Image (tube, rainbow, N blue to C red):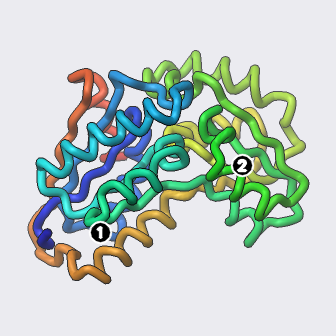
């Protein structure tokens, strides 16, 4: 590995672009390869073995491209497969997104909290260990089945209908919202429109800092002044997703 090689980032769709945006703030000179596995989206309703296999296929693409680090920008893949991948690919640093529930414990312990995540994340052993370690006993776990798919498609009317149906009962009762899927930061304003004034907790800024620390330790930070390159790959070769991905990057 050398410092000029790219960082691989993957998600079950384009939601991980919210993670990449945070990474770009702290590592602006790196080259990136983003892999959107939209052909197999969503991951949340798949078995552990299926998720392991999908993640391995993507990791092998990144290894072929000689990536120097891999970011798992999908909460379900992180919860189900991060440890499996670290044990199988021992020479590759994996940096995995996690729901920012501990941040609620650290900064807003006494306040009513809503965790929005996929069913797969909420049911995972990894998340449950985190949840029970930092439970403030004022937390509602909400599996948002199908929401990531609607965000992926970008249909604003459907997003509003979904959020009104699922979040309206919590309006005025919630102070904190943990965004437990990387798609959800794309609709913060819409969530706030339904819930009222809330504080959002998102694990992406922490992941970005952790990635930078890992690269520094390994002397792999690209310190050149050249403009970074971002390559987008999609397993279903969806040009519309590619267009939306780069639109979001520029926002």
- Measured as percent of width and height from the top left, residue 176 is found at 76, 53
Dot 2 lies on which element?
Answer: strand
In the image, residue 238 sits, relative to residue 106, either above or below, namely above
Which residue is at a point 65% across and 32% down the rendered structure image? 119
Q: Position of residue 28 (x, y in %)?
A: 26, 66
Looking at the rendered image, the quarter that the N terminus falls into is bottom left
Q: Nearer the viewer, residue 2 or 173?
A: 2
In the drawing, what numbered circle is on residue 118?
Answer: none
Which residue is at the front of the view, 45 or 189?
Answer: 45
Q: Residue at x 17, y 59 (%)?
A: 6
Q: Is residue 243 left or right of residue 83?
A: left
- 181 vs 52, nearest the viewer: 52
Identify the element where label 1 is drawn: loop
How many numbered circles does the render carry? 2
The residue depicted at 60 percent of the width and 42 percent of the height is 188
Q: Is residue 4 left or right of residue 243?
A: left
Q: Residue at the spot x=55%, y=42% of the render?
A: 181
Looking at the picture, how far across and down is residue 92, in whole percent? 27, 63
Q: Earlier in the sequence, mark 1 or mark 2?
A: 1
Quick one: label 1, few (<14), some, or many (20+) residues within 10 Å? Answer: some
Q: Find the distance from the CA under tag 1 to the CA under tag 2.
A: 27 Å
Mark 2 crowd level (few <14, some 14–19, many ≥20, 10 Å Cα): many
Q: In the shown orientation, is residue 189 left or right of residue 112?
A: left
- Nearest the eye: 99 or 198: 99
Which disc is residue 27 wearing?
1
Q: Position of residue 38 (x, y in %)?
A: 35, 26
Say if mark 1 contacts mark 2, CB within 8 Å.
no
Q: Is residue 135 above or below residue 18?
A: below
Which picture quadrant has residue 108? bottom right
Question: With respect to residue 165, does 81 lie above or below?
Answer: below
- In the image, which disc is placed on residue 177? 2
């Amino acid at each position: 590995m050398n410092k000029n090689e790219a960082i691989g980032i993957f998600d079950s769709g384009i939601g991980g672009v919210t993670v990449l945006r945070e990474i770009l703030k702290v590592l602006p000179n790196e080259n990136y390869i983003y892999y959107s596995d939209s052909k197999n989206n969503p991951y949340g309703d798949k078995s552990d073995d299926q998720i392991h296999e999908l993640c391995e296929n993507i990791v092998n693409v990144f290894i072929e491209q000689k990536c120097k680090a891999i970011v798992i920008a999908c909460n379900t893949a992180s919860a189900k497969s991060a440890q499996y991948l670290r044990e199988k690919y021992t020479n590759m640093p994996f940096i995995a997104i996690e729901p920012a529930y501990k941040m609620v414990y650290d900064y807003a312990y006494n306040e009513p909290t809503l965790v929005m995540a996929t069913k797969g994340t909420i049911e995972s052993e990894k998340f449950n260990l985190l949840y029970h370690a930092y439970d403030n006993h004022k937390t509602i776990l909400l599996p948002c089945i199908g929401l990531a798919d609607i965000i992926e498609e970008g249909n604003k009317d459907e997003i509003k209908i979904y959020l009104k149906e699922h979040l309206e009962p919590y309006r005025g009762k919630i102070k904190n919202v943990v965004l437990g899927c990387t798609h959800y930061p794309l609709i913060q304003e819409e969530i706030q429109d339904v819930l009222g004034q809330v504080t959002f907790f998102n694990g992406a800024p922490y992941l970005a800092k952790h990635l930078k620390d890992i690269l520094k330790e390994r002397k792999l930070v690209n310190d050149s002044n050249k403009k970074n390159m971002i390559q987008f790959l999609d397993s279903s070769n969806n040009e519309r997703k590619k267009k939306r991905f780069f639109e979001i990057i520029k926002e």
